[in-house]
Amino acid sequence: MHPTDVKYAELLQAGLPTQCCLTWCHERDLDEVARRFGADPETGLWADEDDIEELEEDDHAELLHLVAVGEWMLALEPGGDQGSRNVVVEALSLGGRAFNVYWNVELDSAVTYAADGVIQTAFNLDDVEWRTGAEPFALDELLAEVGLRADLTVTERKARSLALGEQLSGALLTPDWLRSPRYVFKIVNPLPDALVPPAYLHPRSRFLDEPEFARILDDPSPAMAAAVTRQVAATVISIAAIGSPLADEVLRLLDLGERYPGERQELRARLGQEASAVAGQAKLLGGSPEADRLELTGYALVVLQRALEPVPTEAASAASLQALNLRVPDRDDFKRLIVLRNVSKHIERELAR
């Protein structure tokens, strides 16, 4: 068995939760880290295993366990997921770096690395090769070093994702840490998702002041869902440099509506067929630059298909979420997609009230 897998088994035996949300943060101030998680510093207490068990039984609040390791802070959330949220990992990385590994019992997963308030790279353990962010390949050398790749078992990928955090930070996980007393806080006021991450404001990203974008931010309501979808579609067309007439047809339909009954559904079907054909071509070409270009085009066509959902709010949600699967080479384009996704989530919350 690989040493990384042996260590992971030891961590599980020592108490690492089967649903894991573990964050490395380059910040040594306990209270400050707690605040950035949305925890109340006044609730902090030094707790051993028995104390923690009582807290988990007697209180429904999410618990945050903190311990300093070298120059880094380790944050464990048994049963929680705050550290996996973009707004939290961005806040934790302000003025430094933060790295989060998350998976749950349903096998949802996320690995996220941020620096100076910006998500540099992110991926899930089901698709390690497809990484997004401002610098999607930022951790490639470390990924190769720890051997985290797609052909491993789920357990092996989990083990190596933890090893990735250790290599990045130098803050090692040990069974003793999981058995030892640690500082525990209650997360009582989770951070709200900011429409525009703070790092995009200092310096201010220029796209925020584009007239149509500013109009969306001034009124992030369900009435703006169609405008969000239009922005997502235009952005991915630009990113993937799609020259197909299909792209023009999508934008025309989003702007003017259907010319005849069934046009939307017909166009969605054509986009799906084209996306499948492009994906097939990419597989035949292997790992070449042309294959990468075709793969990006295929993902972008799927985004355009999602943008044609008949209900505007559903289209905005589906398209903005799918767009985050694109490898985005331009930092401003990536930021634009993040803000559009944040607006879409805000609209979803408005509808749920």
Image (spheres, rainbow, N blue to C red):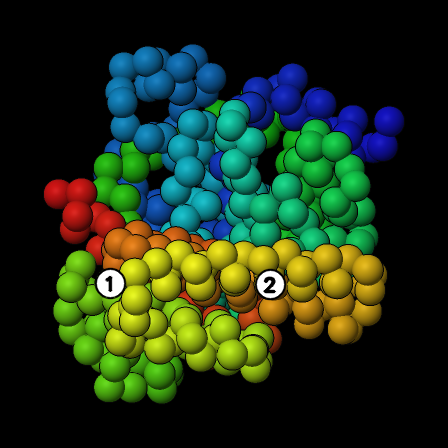
Depth check, front residue: 17 or 235: 235
Tell me the amino acid under the disc marked 2.
Glu
- Total numbered labels placed on residues in the image: 2
Q: Nearer the viewer, mark 2 or mark 1?
A: 2
Depth check, front residue: 280 or 200: 280
Residue 330 visible in image: no
Compute the Cα span from label 2 to label 1. Answer: 26 Å
The residue that appears at 26% across and 66% down in the rendered structure is 226
The residue that appears at 25% across and 81% down in the rendered structure is 212
In the image, residue 209 sits, relative to residue 344, either above or below, namely: below
Residue 122 left/right relative to 221: right
The quarter of the picture where the N terminus appears is: top right
Q: Quadrant of residue 12?
A: top right
Depth check, front residue: 314 or 331: 314
**Which residue, given by chain and number where applicable, does mark 2 sit on?**
274
The residue that appears at 16% across and 51% down in the rendered structure is 350
**Which residue, given by chain and number where applicable, does mark 1 sit on?**
225
Residue 110 spot, x, y in % from top left: 54, 45
Residue 115 spot, x, y in % from top left: 52, 65
In the image, residue 333 sits, relative to residue 128, either above or below, namely: below
Tell me the amino acid under the disc marked 1.
Ala
Residue 156 spot, x, y in % from top left: 74, 33
Residue 17 left/right relative to 158: left
The residue that appears at 75% across and 32% down in the rendered structure is 153
Element under label 2? helix
Residue 312 left/right relative to 3: left
- Mark 2 or mark 1, which has the lower sequence index? 1
Q: Quadrant of residue 207?
A: bottom left
